[in-house]
């Protein structure tokens, strides 16, 4: 960890991270990005295939859905800091495709110092935890997003947190009506978070 960290110094230090084995199959470390003084920090699980290739968080299909939801909630993406609990893409090959594989608790723990440093450096007013992995990594293994989504709670990070679904779960909804319902509920959760912008 660098002395007197900035987001850029943290990103440079994380680029060489070998705290777990995920680095060996990933294209690169995908560190957080956005306003270094953001009032909102959005934390997902891990980078996906697109993010691994481009080196930026939330640039794939789930990121595009997140952009739409942020816009509907009146949250400019330029005003938030986006990151993931795990900084390398964990995947399994299926034919020519690299498919997401959920990180285990050891991999989450290995990356936790990076998330802690990001929170300490950015100092957001609210951390939005996208999906179960992010919520459980910060709030503990007993957290259930389905029961606690949209509620602002204290976190061990020293800032308040709000758990909600990961945008990829909306993409996996079985039909258009389910996707529309899930998106509307996600936007409502983000509107709660938007109150922390002012």
Image: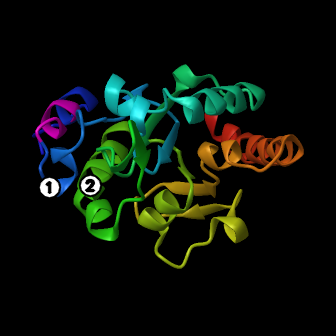
Q: What residue did someone put label 2 on?
A: 111
Q: Secondary structure at mark 1?
A: loop
| Label 2 residue SS | helix
Residue 151 at x, y percent in the picture: 69, 61
- Can you see residue 98? yes
154 and 28: which is toward the camera: 28
Q: Is residue 125 left or right of residue 104?
A: right
Residues at badges 2 and 1 in contact (C-beta under 8 Å)? yes
- Would you say residue 9 sits in the magenta stretch? no
Q: How packed is label 2: few (under 14 Cα within 10 Å), some, or many (20 or more)?
A: many
> Looking at the rendering, in which quadrant would you find the C terminus?
top right
Tell me the magenta residue range. Answer: 11-16
Does residue 191 lie above or below 151 as drawn? above
Give the quadrant of residue 156: bottom left
Q: CA distance from mark 2 to mark 1?
A: 7 Å
Measured from the top left, where is residue 54 in percent x and y? 35, 23
Q: Residue 61 versus residue 98: which sits nearer the camera?
A: 98
Compared across the picture, whether 21 is left or right of 146 comes to: left
Of mark 2 and mark 1, the one earlier in the sequence is 1
Image quarter (top left, top right, bottom left or bottom right) of the N terminus: top left
* Residue closest to the eye, 10 or 30: 30
Residue situated in front as seen by the camera: 160 or 185? 185
Q: Which residue is the site of mark 1?
A: 19
Please tell me how crowded label 1 is: few (under 14), some (14-19), or many (20+) other residues with Cα within 10 Å.
few
């Amino acid at each position: 960890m660098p002395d007197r960290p900035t987001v850029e110094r943290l990103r440079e230090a994380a680029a060489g991270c070998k705290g777990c084995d995920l680095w060996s199959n990933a294209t690169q470390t995908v560190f957080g990005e956005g306003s270094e003084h953001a009032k909102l920090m959005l934390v997902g699980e891990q980078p996906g295939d697109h993010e691994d290739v481009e080196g930026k968080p939330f640039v794939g299909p789930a990121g595009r859905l997140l952009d739409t939801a942020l816009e509907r909630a009146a949250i400019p993406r330029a005003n938030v800091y986006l990151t993931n609990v795990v900084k390398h893409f964990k995947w399994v090959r299926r034919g020519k495709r690299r498919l997401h594989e959920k990180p285990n608790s050891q991999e989450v723990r290995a990356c936790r110092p990076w998330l802690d440093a990001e929170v300490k450096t950015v100092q957001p007013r609210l951390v939005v935890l996208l999906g179960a992995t992010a919520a459980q990594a910060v709030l503990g293994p007993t957290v259930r997003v389905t029961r606690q989504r949209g509620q602002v709670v204290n976190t061990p990070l020293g800032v308040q947190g709000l758990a909600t679904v990961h945008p990829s779960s909306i993409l996996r909804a079985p039909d258009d009506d389910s996707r529309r319902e899930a998106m509307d509920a996600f936007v409502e959760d983000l509107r709660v978070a938007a109150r922390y912008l002012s």
